[in-house]
Image: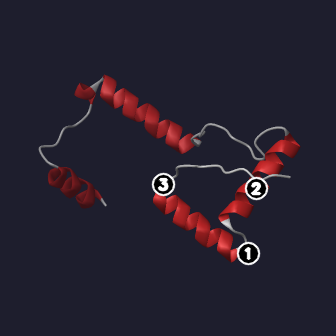
Amino acid sequence: MANANINVRVDAELKRSAEILFEDLGLTMSSAITIFLKSAVKHEGIPFEIRRYAPNAETRAALAEYKEMKKNPGNYKRYKSFDDMADEVFADA
């Protein structure tokens, strides 16, 4: 079977991290990508779950609070500076 080249552009730090990982696993970048491609063909799709990030309940509540604060800024206390806000928060701690 003839070999073919694939050129892929990725973030340099991601490439370095992957090379370190694959080396530790006894793989080359080429062999790791080949494993991925063979697995994708075998599974007739991406061989792992791909889904949107689903925030947990605490994060959803914080995002809802942020939207409410943005929608009704007059209902919330304002500070002249970050230091003023931090002083109040740390005084209550």
Please, what secondary structure does the residue beneath circle 3 have? loop
Q: Residue at x 22, y 55 (%)?
A: 86
Q: What x and y, as percent, mark residue 87?
A: 19, 57
Q: What x and y, as percent, mark residue 74?
A: 23, 26
Q: What amino acid is found at the position of numbered circle 3 in the picture?
A: Asp
| Residue linked to disc 2 | 34
Determine whether, in the image, residue 8 is placed left or right of residue 28.
left
Of the pair 65 and 38, the residue shown nearer to us? 38
Q: Residue at x 60, y 68 (%)?
A: 19
Q: What amino acid is found at the position of numbered circle 2 in the picture?
A: Thr
Of the pair 19 and 60, the residue shown nearer to us? 19
Q: Residue at x 58, y 49 (%)?
A: 8
Number of numbered discs present?
A: 3
Position above or below: 50 against 8: above
Instruction: Tell me if mark 1 has few (under 14), some (14-19) or many (20+) residues whose alpha carbon lies within 10 angstroms of its own.
Output: few
Q: Which mark's residue is nearer the viewer, 1 or 2?
A: 2
Give the Cα distance between marks 2 and 3: 20 Å
Q: What amino acid is found at the position of numbered circle 1 in the picture?
A: Gly
Determine whether, in the image, residue 36 is placed left or right of residue 59.
right
- The earlier-in-sequence mark between 1 and 2 is 1
Q: What x and y, as percent, mark residue 4?
A: 72, 50
Do the residues under discs 1 and 2 have CB atoms within 8 angstroms? Answer: no
Determine whether, in the image, residue 29 is placed left or right of residue 74.
right
Q: Which mark is residue 11?
A: 3
Determine whether, in the image, residue 60 is placed left or right of residue 32.
left
Please, what secondary structure does the residue beneath circle 2 have? helix
| Residue linked to disc 1 | 26
